[in-house]
Image (cartoon, helix red, strand yellow):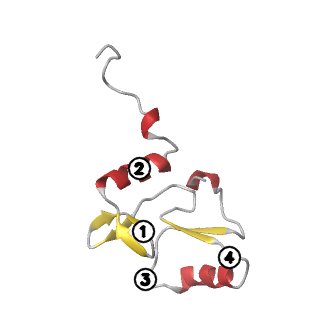
Amino acid sequence: MFISDYIGESNEYDKKLMLEEKKPKSWLKSVSAFANGKGGILFFGVADDDTLVGYYVGDGSRTAFVRVGNESVQAGAIELKRLVLRGSNRTYDSLSSHYPYEN
């Protein structure tokens, strides 16, 4: 399942541009609603027009995190490239090469 498969918002998922630390009510309402229902998914980093805005921006740098077991850890270079490809519905094998076949 890709993020592009989730169009708009529904009773199963909600999209937020960012985690507003100074306005927690804006996203905690969704958390509460999902917790009091059948569950759901919150996507952060997605604008209202479904544009993917990007990763967490903290301390002035853009950082992507991935889930490893019960921890959120910073994505390494290879994992970050995989995330970018997955977000654009592509795989490494589908990328074209700049080298001629003969080489």
Disc 4 or 3, which lies upstream in sequence? 3
Viewed as shown, does residue 16 lie left or right of 37?
Answer: left
Q: Quadrant of the C terminus?
A: top left
Q: How far separated are the C-alphas under marks 3 and 1?
A: 24 Å
Q: Position of residue 43 (x, y in %)?
A: 54, 67
Mark 1–mark 2 CB contact (< 8 Å): no
Q: Of 51 and 34, which appears nearest the observer?
A: 34
Mark drawn on residue 39: 4
Point out the frontmost of discs 3 and 1. Answer: 1
Point out the frontmost of discs 1 and 2. Answer: 1
Disc 4 or 2, which lies upstream in sequence? 4
Mark drawn on residue 21: 3
Viewed as shown, does residue 84 lie left or right of 14?
Answer: left
Q: How far separated are the C-alphas under marks 1 and 2?
A: 15 Å
Viewed as shown, does residue 71 lie left or right of 51?
Answer: left
In this view, 18 is above or below 88: below
Mark drawn on residue 82: 2
Point out the frontmost of discs 1 and 4. Answer: 1
Residue at left offset 35%, top offset 27%: 97
